[in-house]
Image: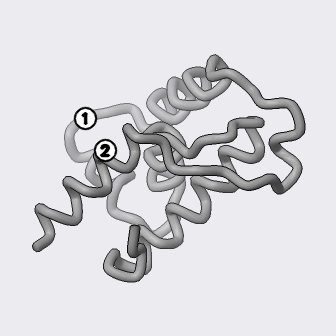
Amino acid sequence: MRFDKFTLKVQEAMQDAQQLANQFGHQGVDVEHLFLAMLRQPEGVVQSIMERIGANVRNVERDLEKALEKLPRVSGAGTGGQVYITPRLKNVLDNAFSEAQ
């Protein structure tokens, strides 16, 4: 996947999502990791969009953290190990790229 085709904010969010996967001890970066990373971006649009539709951003963030805590942990992960993009996230990114074109 060519991340250089995405915006700088998405590239930053993907890096943050990888860090979240490591922090939670996950081997794969999934949709929830990216959503949480984008939600936490200080100058990103996701938080303002969520507020605009009436969502409680803090509750969404907490729910994402709970969902991530339930995912299986891999022994040795979380220490800077290699992570991969899950098929779910790849599908989301492929669709986003297609929509952008």
- Amino acid under disc 1: Gly
**Across the whole image, how many numbered discs are drawn on residues?**
2
Q: Please name the residue shown 35% across and 54% down the image.
A: 46
Task: Say what secondary structure mark 2 lies in.
Answer: helix
Q: Nearer the viewer, residue 42 or 34?
A: 34
Q: Identify which residue, 22 or 61, lies in the foreground.
A: 22
In whole angstroms, how far apart are the C-alphas of marks 2 and 1?
5 Å
Please tell me how crowded label 1 is: few (under 14), some (14-19), or many (20+) other residues with Cα within 10 Å: few
Labels 2 & 1 near each other (Cβ < 8 A) = yes
Residue 81: x, y in percent?
80, 53
Q: Quadrant of the N terminus?
A: bottom left
Q: Nearest the camera: 28 or 11? A: 28
Left or right position of 61 against 93: right
> Which color scheme is applied?
one colour
Q: Nearer the viewer, residue 76 or 17?
A: 76
- Is 32 drawn above or below residue 18 in the view shown? above
In percent of the image, x 10 and y 73: which residue is there? 101
Which residue corresponds to the image point at 26% horizontal and 57% vertical from the top-left? 94
Spot occupied by residue 26 in the image (x, y as percentages of width and height): 69, 36
Q: Quadrant of residue 5?
A: bottom left
User: Vertically, is 20 above or below 96?
Assistant: above
The residue shown at (40%, 82%) is 4
Name the amino acid, label 2.
Glu
Residue designated by label 2: 51
Secondary element at tag 1 = loop
Residue 10: give x, y in percent of width and height.
Answer: 41, 68
Q: Which residue is mark 1?
A: 54
Is 90 placed left or right of 34 in the picture? left
